[in-house]
Amino acid sequence: MNFALTEEQEAVRKMLRSFVDKEIIPYIQEWDANWHFETSIMKRLAELDLMGVCIPEQYGGAGMDYNTLAIVCEELERGDTAFRTAVSVHTGLNSMTLLQWGNEFQKEKYLVPQAKGEKIGAFGLTEPNAGSDVAAMQTTARRDGDEYIINGSKTWISLCDVADHFLIFAKTDKDKGHHGISCFIVERTYPGVSTKAIKGKLGIRAGNTGEVFLEEVRVPAENMLGDEGEGFKIAMSALDNGRFTVAAGACGLINASLEASVKYCHERKTFGKEIGKHQLVQQMIAKMSSNLEISRLLVYRAGWLKNEGKRNTRETSLAKWIACDAAFEAASDAVQVHGAYGYSNEYPVERFLRNAKAPVIYEGTREIHTIMQAEYALGYRSDKALRQMLPSWPFEEE
């Protein structure tokens, strides 16, 4: 086992850390307070060749490995969850799904411009009455000649107002449950597509999240991703990639909480000494530090499996569960370390705590991942190779 990052990975981390320090952290409090999603950040990431960081060069990406994507997500979330979320959705949920399941026509038309950052991709699975219970979705797609007509709505869709392309999951056969779901590439410009942002969120206020409405939307049959009825498998494999990026981002939030707390521990004095000298404060710092290392190891193991071209549903689920729980605990402890000041936006830790709650819920709740891990341990659940696997790294040109 080699736990060292490559020179290229270290360079990416250094570059992203500098980027976040200069272009996100000085402005994030204002963006968060004004519910403003700063789209120029995505343009700058595209200029840095990071919107398709782990997409092969032949499809417009940087051709780096999957753990480099994890590093990008960690460093972005150190600045704010909103921008890690943008990369998670655009790259993890959409572009990597196109890479895994798309045919050459679809890759050339949709993946290439997304990998270059010229177009933005989003992911439409969740509905008002269908979250963890995917089979309960009510969005439908019916065949009409060389097209499918889609009707329905999706909610809690990140990048809803800025995405050019959506992966939309819909039932093509209502009587087949999971096996009746299909996936479609839907362009924003198709007649009948509309979106609306959701306000009033607890956290990730600097991100764009909302609803997608589809009314008699005609989609070319050639835009079906995978085969008809294969949508559930596509969605679950996409979540393997999305959960991986969420877990990596959680490491960034733990790190941000730790950095802020250590700084405050040296600045604040009580009873004649720095508060970092008090043992119960040290206990919170120790938990943050150890959980950061544990979470990173779980993430990098999942990334290694991706690089090897192996199924990683179990390992990615574990990384997502543990890292997101640890991030929420770290943010809560960071507020505690700051005392009354932690309850004010004078310090960033109150934003960390608000942001940390959502990842414990989305892309599989903590409870879903708990059940998954128990079923793996009990032998009730196992994973088989998919018809289409995510390509191993280094990438080979086709």
Image: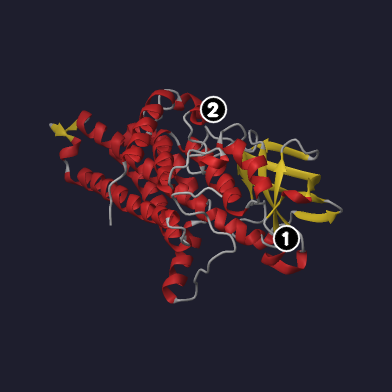
Q: Position of residue 384 (x, y in %)?
A: 52, 69
Q: Which residue is mark 1?
A: 228
Identified at 17% across, 41% down, the residue is: 278
Q: Amino acid at mark 1?
A: Glu
Identified at 61% across, 42% down, the residue is: 111
Q: Could you say which disc has been placed on residue 309 in the image?
A: none
Q: Marks 1 and 2: in contact by CB < 8 Å?
A: no
Give the mark nearest the N terminus, 2 or 1: 2
Q: Position of residue 112 (x, y in %)?
A: 60, 39
Q: Position of residue 35 (x, y in %)?
A: 55, 29
Residue 102 position (above or below residue 13): below
Q: Which residue is mark 2?
A: 43
Q: Position of residue 51 (x, y in %)?
A: 52, 36
> Which residue of the protein is positioned furthest toward the right in this rendering?
145
**Is residue 202 visible to us here?**
no
Q: Secondary structure at mark 1?
A: loop
Q: Nearer the viewer, residue 275 or 53?
A: 53
Identified at 54% across, 35% down, the residue is: 207
> Which residue of the protein is positioned furthest toward the left in this rendering?
272
State the quadrant of the N terminus. bottom left
Judged left or right of residue 223, residue 1 is left
Q: Secondary structure at mark 2?
A: helix
Judged left or right of residue 189, residue 29 is left
Q: Amino acid at mark 2?
A: Lys
Label 1 neighbour load within 10 Å: few <14, some 14-19, many 20+ = some
| Marks 2/1: CA–CA distance | 35 Å
